Image: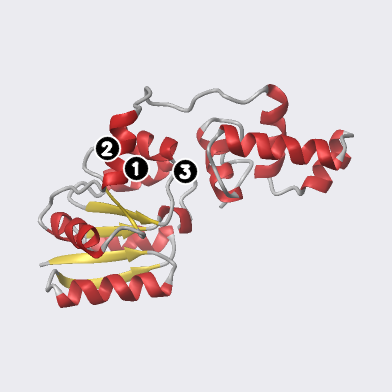
Amino acid sequence: MKTFILADNQYVTREGIAAVLVRENLAGRIAAVGRLKELQEKLGEYPDAVVVLDYSLFDFSSQQQMLAVKAKAKESRWILFSNELSERFLRYVLLQDDTMSIVMKHDGGEEILAALQNASYHGTYICDYAAHVLKDHVPPPGVPDVLTSSEKNILREIALGKTTKEIAWEKHLSFHTVNSHRKNIFRKIEVNSIQEAIRYAISSGIIDMSDYYI
């Protein structure tokens, strides 16, 4: 039986998945990790493990970094298991790696179990939502250039940890103007959180890892 690595910082989720694995007799070993370094160490020990990952709660700097870590553990199988993954993110990941399984935390028990079972036998599972995203609209790989130069500058400041008030003061803009830019940026790049915005800024080259450290 497989080793399962639960890379999820929600206690309830980890315990729930572990309980399912034990009940269904799918796992020979279950390990929980909370950071990228711990995940890499466990993959070094168990290179053919199944990784159940909530990307939105983990400390990857970008989807490219996540895919690079997965690629180094060639025998591993990964399940992305989150409350919310943007369509842009899903399209990019699924186009780059067709062995990645996707299931959402709001999916039913049968779908979640199917994802775990498929991964344990070196298979792949794509939930209905992810399948619809991939089928409905598949743009070419890469990050679309949807932001104006002003919006890129604002996003860079946001990604570097500056508040709306600080950005407004430094750019000689009103708080309302910066806040409006922020809303437009989040809408255009299809993100809902600062962490997702930071990942977009890194993956699109607006900032690089020498500017920002997760």
The one nearer the camera, 73 or 31, is 31
Disc 3 crowd rating (10 Å Cα; few below 14, some 14-19, many 20+) is many
Query: What residue did someone put label 3 on?
Result: 62
At label 2, the amino acid type is Asp
The secondary structure type at the circle numbered 1 is helix
Q: Earlier in the sequence, mark 2 or mark 3?
A: 3
Residue at the spot x=37%, y=22% of the render? 140
Check contact, mark 2 vs mark 3: CB within 8 A: no
Q: Disc 2 or disc 1, which is closer to the eye?
A: 2
- Above or below, 153 against 47 in this view is above
The secondary structure type at the circle numbered 3 is loop
Residue at the spot x=27%, y=43% of the render? 71
Query: What residue did someone put label 2 on?
Result: 97
Residue 47 in sight in this render: no
Residue at the spot x=58%, y=44% of the render? 198
Check contact, mark 2 vs mark 1: CB within 8 A: yes
At label 1, the amino acid type is Leu
At label 3, the amino acid type is Ser
- Above or below, 107 against 29 in this view is above
Query: What residue did someone put label 1 on?
Result: 67
